[in-house]
């Protein structure tokens, strides 16, 4: 597992790093652990999100399999982006240790979109109301000369 240097700079990212290591990583000295590394899981923190990439380490040729300088990385997937919302003190609840202030739920995004559409309608109705009031202000009522031209 490879982590970006930002995972050592921020407290909440240190916690997330430890959670990922414990959830995904192989325990030290596990009997099924292989004595070589054939893939790398990479975690980077950008734009307030954690970007995950999975790479395979492969030699250029069969003769190069023991030479670490003659290895290539090939992305094999999956590729995903994690957005951290909250970190709790317990497993599924408890007090909030970290809360992402920039996160907006899908419902909040839909409400904002509806308000934007609604405000366009309200603006149009206000403009039509102002036009009617201006037209009514220009009407001067019945004039004496109106009877002459009828």
Image (spheres, rainbow, N blue to C red):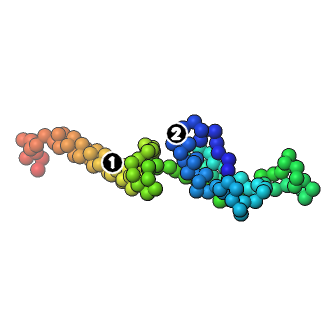
Looking at the rendered structure, which numbered label has been put on residue 9? none
Crowding at label 1, few (<14), some or many (≥20) Cα neighbours within 10 Å? few
- Determine the secondary structure under disc 2: helix
In the picture as drawn, the residue positioned furthest to the bottom comes out as 32
115 on left or right of 60: left
Give me the C-alpha separation between circle 2 and circle 1. Answer: 41 Å
| First in sequence: mark 2 vs mark 1 | 2
Q: Quadrant of residue 93?
A: bottom left
User: Residue 75 at x, y = what percent?
Assistant: 72, 55
- For residue 77, which quarter of the picture? bottom right
Left or right of 135 on screen, residue 112: right
Viewer-proximal residue among 108 and 3: 3
The mark total stands at 2
Question: Is residue 46 something that shows in the picture?
Answer: no
Residue identified by numbered label 1: 119
- For the residue pair 106 and 98, the one nearer the viewer reads as 98
Percent position of residue 53, x then y: 66, 53
Does residue 20 sit above or below 138 in this rendering? below
Q: Are marks 2 and 1 in contact (CB under 8 Å)?
A: no
- Disc assigned to residue 11: 2
Position of residue 94 measured from the top left corner of the image (x, y, whole percent): 39, 52
Residue at x-position 36% and y-position 53%? 111
């Amino acid at each position: 597992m490879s982590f970006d240097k930002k995972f050592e700079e921020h407290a909440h990212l240190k916690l997330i790093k430890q959670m990922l290591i414990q959830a995904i990583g192989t325990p030290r000295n596990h009997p099924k652990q292989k004595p070589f590394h054939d893939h790398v899981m990479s975690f980077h923190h950008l734009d307030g999100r954690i970007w995950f990439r999975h790479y395979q380490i492969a030699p250029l040729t069969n003769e190069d399999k023991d030479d670490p300088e003659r290895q290539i990385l090939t992305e094999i997937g999956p590729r995903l982006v994690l957005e951290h919302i909250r970190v709790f003190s317990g497993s599924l609840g408890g007090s909030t240790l970290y809360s992402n202030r920039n996160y907006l739920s899908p419902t909040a995004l839909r409400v904002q979109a509806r308000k934007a559409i609604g405000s366009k309608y309200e603006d149009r109705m206000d403009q039509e109301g102002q036009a009617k009031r201006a037209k009514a202000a220009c009407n001067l009522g019945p004039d004496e000369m109106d009877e002459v031209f009828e």
